[in-house]
Amino acid sequence: MVREIELKILPHERTDEDLIRRRLAAKCRVPEQQISAIQTRRRSVDARGSRPFFLIRYAVFLNETPPAEAPLLKGLRVLDETAPEAIVIGAGPAGYFAALELLEKGIRPILYDRGKTVRDRRRDLRAIQQFGEVNPHSNYCFGEGGAGTYSDGKLYTRSHKRGNIEKALRLLVEHGAKSDILVDAHPHIGSNKLPVIVANIRASIEQYGGEIHFGCQMTDLLLRDGKVEGVVINETEEKRAAAVVLATGHSARDVYYLLHRRGVRIEAKPFALGVRIERPQPLSDRIQYGQSPREAALPASSYRLACQVEGRGVFSFCMCPGGLVVPAATAPGEIVVNGMSLSRRDSPYANSGTVVAVELEDLADYQQHGVFAGVEFQRSVERAMFGAGDGSQRAPAIRLTDFSRQKPSANLAETSYIPGLFSAPLYDLLPPSIYQRLQRGVRVFGKKMKGYYTAEANVIGTESRTSSPLRIPRDGQTLMHEEVAGLFPCGEGAGYAGGIISAAMDGQNVARAVARFYD
């Protein structure tokens, strides 16, 4: 017999196995000896009361042994060159999980990525951090593992109806992630752990017959009579296949322009743009837990805030407790920031994107750019931030209270941002519609979360890559482009995902659609 029991556990009790066993036996009304095994099914932190506690759901096995689960890739056959092939463009979570799923379906993935391996990317990350040099093909957004690898590794998603979350998480565990991600309400891996996991996934793809090529940018599509026939790599090499999976991420703007030139329909869609706000982690802990320093067993505290201002959502995004702010530009001449955390989340800082929803009607001043109005809006803000500085990756910033009051900051709070910050009037650098809503939004957040509105926080510009401003439309049943047979838009860049897990699940869904297409 298996019983599911939920317990409230104080932080210092979390590792006391004997105490937990006694409580579970009492709840089940059985002697402790009848409990043959205990498994954690779900774990979260509840900080709403005077003292935070863990809410943990256990599976209690009474006089029976838990069933063993076979590895997901066990028994997968190795495919050779006689197997059908599909091209995958992009080695982020959408592309890699699509490749794994294709292998399960008996299709060899031939994967191309413009960037470098996850290990080789580190040199380019160091170059942008320390020297302000932006490699347009290898940076925090481009390269093996995609944007998520070096920007935190949060695995939370609300897209529970879009695919098999458990399968995606189990694959990560089988490639090196801790099993905690299977039970935590807000699972997280960390940017120091993800590179090894990503490299292990690459090894699995190659082990079972897939191919992965780095430094290979898709520069053209081979199209004929409404069908895709393959791709052109680095302007010279043609690779042909009946199916092409486009999993290029939300910052591969050149892909959108390529599709437009080739007559492949793309659509403008809403997105969001704003700033990243960084504050001391102990301040966040004091606000959320009522204690600083926090109890050792408690994770670094996080928050999620949202409100409506003048008909547009203002909301926190990609919260990184115990994290760092990093430069995420993908081309010279722009300032883009993002957040990341290591697995222990032990940085003395917390940061979160704080952004405003941008609807298509907000882009009237950019209508001359047609479907690319949102892209050009993003680019104009990123360039304005760069133009306010000294030509490096130092980012413009202002204290939160000064930001709200439209007052220059004489100095700034300490920061985790390695290239450095300089004081700048972000209230003038941001578009008025963005600034005015942010100005009101942070005051609302200060009322919702006492202590949020503080001079100890820096507002840093700009958080502009929350999602793609374009969608590559696809049929809801076949998941193919509505007008091009064999072309499968996938993941964040296509407008169908918003994070590591949702992108991974979309990759799996698209791979299954490719298999149906081949059948």
Image (spheres, rainbow, N blue to C red):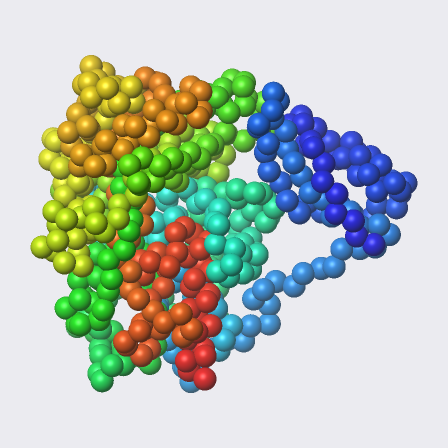
Residue 256 against residue 292 in the figure, above or below: below
Looking at the rendered image, the quarter that the N terminus falls into is bottom right
Residue 456 lies in quadrant: top left
Would you say 41 lies left or right of 112 here? right
Residue 158 against residue 10 in the figure, above or below: below
- Residue 267, how many percent across, how many down? 24, 62
The foreground one among 30 and 12 is 30
Looking at the rendered image, the quarter that the C terminus falls into is bottom left
Q: Hey, which residue is sitting farthest top in the picture? A: 410
- Marks counted in the figure total 0
Would you say 483 lies left or right of 9 here? left
Q: Residue at x 21, y 61 (%)?
A: 256
- Residue 59, how many percent across, how many down? 74, 48
Q: Residue at x 42, y 73 (%)?
A: 477
The foreground one among 193 and 453 is 453
Residue 302 against residue 222 in the figure, above or below: above
Would you say 376 lies left or right of 487 here? left
Is residue 472 visible in the rendered image? The answer is yes
Is residue 96 visible in the rendered image? The answer is no
Residue 110 lies in quadrant: bottom left
- Residue 491, how many percent across, how many down? 37, 59
Q: Residue at x 44, y 55 (%)?
A: 502
Q: Residue at x 58, y 64 (%)?
A: 72
The foreground one among 33 and 126 is 33
- Residue 463, how many percent across, how many down? 28, 39
Q: Hey, which residue is sitting farthest left in the picture? A: 368
